Image: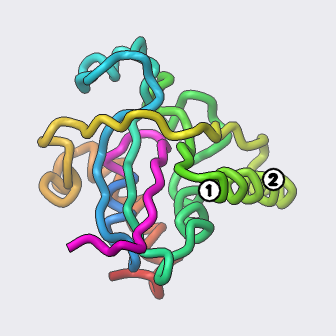
Amino acid sequence: MTNKQSEVTTLGGGCFWCLEAVFDQLVGVEDVVSGYMGGHVTNPTYEQVCGGRTGHAEVVQVRFDPAQLSFREVLDVFFTIHDPTTLNRQGNDVGPQYRSAIFYHSPEQQATATEVINDLNQQRLWPRPIVTEVTAASHFYAAENYHQEYFALNGSQPYCQWVIVPKVAKFRKQYAAKLK
């Protein structure tokens, strides 16, 4: 049964497998679905999105209980687990589908996202300014079934070991008190 007080946000921060692996472990998160948002092609496939010409970003749609986890806390985790200063790139993943993006679902989310980015830029945590786009949510397309819970089902794969495991470890160390 879905909590009627749930809130939804959609986040892009490189490969959706990485984001899903982290948010699945966070207290207050009820569901995480990997997918695509922000493009101009209806029902895009993974292959189309990877080609970088659909305009979509790989994203996760996160449903969370704001009584347990605020949107600001969701963004704190988001900015911890990816580099928001690289345009259309996360590590070796390059292209507009890997851009850093917050697709807001309410004016309050938009205001919070803008405030968090301004605060982080003032703190100068990174050597370059944040390039995360803050855009109104558009149609969300769930990724193909084999992308859902990818890390949980394929954690021994080389990409998971080299890219996702370090992000999950960093998250688990920094947010130990917020783990399910």
Residue 92 visible in image:
no
Asked if the stretch drawn in magenta spans residue 159, the answer is no
> Which of the two residues, 170 or 179, is positioned nearer the viewer here?
179
Q: Residues within 10 Å of mark 1 (few under 14, many from 20)?
A: many
Q: Which residue is mark 1?
A: 109
Whether 157 is drawn above or below 109: the answer is above
Q: With 162 as the anchor, is 83 left or right in this view?
A: right
The x and y percentages for residue 56 are: 42, 26
Residue 100 visible in image:
yes
Amino acid type indicated by mark 1 = Gln
Label 1 or label 2, whichever comes before in sequence order: 1
> Residue at 36% of width from left, 34% of height from top?
36
The x and y percentages for residue 78 are: 53, 58
Amino acid type indicated by mark 2 = Asn
Number of on-image labels: 2
Whether 38 is drawn above or below 64: the answer is above
The x and y percentages for residue 127 are: 78, 46
Q: Which residue is mark 2?
A: 118
Q: Which residues are magenta?
A: 1-18
> Which of the two residues, 125 or 161, is positioned nearer the viewer here?
125
The x and y percentages for residue 161 are: 28, 53
Whether 50 is drawn above or below 170: the answer is above
Asked if the stretch drawn in magenta spans residue 14, the answer is yes
Marks 1 and 2, Cα distance to the nearest angstrom?
14 Å
User: In which quarter of the view is residue 73 placed?
Assistant: bottom right
Judged from the image, the secondary structure of the residue bearing numbered disc 1 is: helix
